[in-house]
Amino acid sequence: MIYLQLFLTFFKIGLFTFGGGYAMIPLIEEEMLAHAWMDTEQLINFMAVSESTPGPFAINIATYVGSVTAPIGLLGSACATLGVVLPSFLIILLVARMYQKFKTNRIVAGCMNGLKPAVVGLIAGAVVTMGSAVFFPAGWALSVLTSYWFIVSSIIFVGMLVLVFKKAHPIVVVALSAALGIAAGVLQPWIG
Amino acid sequence: MEKRRDLKTIFQLFVTFAKIGGFTFGGGLAMLPLIQHETVERRKWVTEQDIMDILAIAESTPGPIAINSATFIGYQTAGFWGAFAATFGVILPSFVVISIIATVLTAFQQNLYVQYAFNGIRAGMLALIVKSLWTMYKKCPKHAWSYVVMVAAFALSAFTGINVVWIILGCAAFGLAATLIAQRRAEK
């Protein structure tokens, strides 16, 4: 049953992701591909939508996936969102009563020492799969390196990387890349 | 801090966190300045020190930081129903906005210009993800074995089909063991 599946999958995502930013991406990507709810390309598209709409990414993607996969979209969204929120909610309720102890707990600190580098490695893994979806959407081949869209993507990627490290706001990055993408598409008959 | 369990406080928690959820783009860490402004300076529900604690706790408990913070502040302010109201509040704007967008997005996905735009956007997003990777790397402890964990997690996730959950659990266990051994040695 899709509603239970949505709830359980997003519960798992909520329970096993630590840290902010895109720490959730590796597990979300794995689960979306495993259920065929989204491919990597659609996931990156939605990350951009999420950057341009209010609210946390985890809630946004849970709501979206619930909506597009379930026959009753709103119910699907509710199940997925409840799933991703519930682990945090319950764990924080427990921790809130004794958080001074929790803060200095050696076991928690020890696990975090392993989790932080793990998240770095996992996101690096996601960069590889997402990079190949961006630059080689039809698979690896030498001929791709001279194709029009490969060159366009490379220029946008490098340009945006510079902007991002100069602390440009993510929405600016999304808007500029969108404009460049449209310009490249429109100009393709002339310069492609 | 004394807990106020009255309906008015609970309602205020809901409204405040709905505002926070509705006006921040880009998730939990981007929310913290607004959370701090609303709950410390304006409402005086929690203290500056609480906000520091929340960040530390949010980073060492699972789930989105926005949810962790809302639940924690709600609970500290007004108990269980406070936690519920704040968490519900922070979710609601996202839920409504994305429910609407989901129908629009599916309708526009076939449009040629939308496809061009997303071709560009995906390359730009990759740059944002690389930045996120760099930020996480900087925050990460730099023991010799941290790099071993990093490389192992990368290799296992990129080149094998091993479930990410197992990688996470394995790395947590390894981190715990390595830390406890290092502490034992230091005590000797």
Image: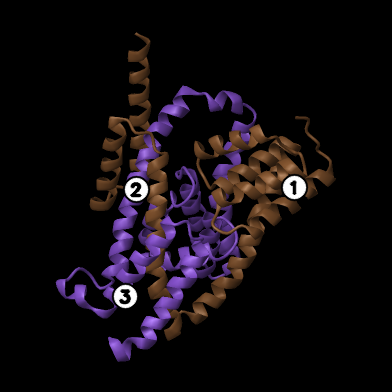
Shown colour of chain A: purple
Residue at 63%, 36% in the rendered image? A93
Q: Which is more foreground, mark 2 or mark 3?
A: 3
Q: Which residue is mark 3?
A: A152
Pinpoint residue A133: horizontal percent, then vertical percent: 31, 66
Q: Which residue is mark 2?
A: A122
Residue A71, quarter of picture: bottom right
Q: Which is more foreground, mark 3 or mark 1?
A: 3
Residue at 42%, 74% in the rendered image? B118
Shown colour of chain B: brown
As drawn, A55 above or below A17:
below
Spatial CA distance of label 1 from label 2 is: 35 Å
Q: How was the colour assigned to the protein in this rendering?
A: by chain
Question: Is disc 3 in the same subunit as disc 1?
Answer: no
Of callouts 2 and 3, the N-terminal one: 2
Q: Which residue is mark 1?
A: B13
| Left or right: A72 in relation to A22 | right
CA neighbours of label 3 inside 10 A, class few (<14), some (14 to 19), many (20+): some
Residue B82 in sight: no
Determine whether the residue tagged by mark 3 lies in a helix, strand or loop.
helix
**Label 3 chain ID:** A
Pinpoint residue A175: horizontal percent, then vertical percent: 49, 71
Q: Nearer the viewer, residue A59 or A22?
A: A22
The three-letter amino acid code for the residue at tag 2 is Leu
**Label 1 chain ID:** B
CA neighbours of label 1 inside 10 A, class few (<14), some (14 to 19), many (20+): many
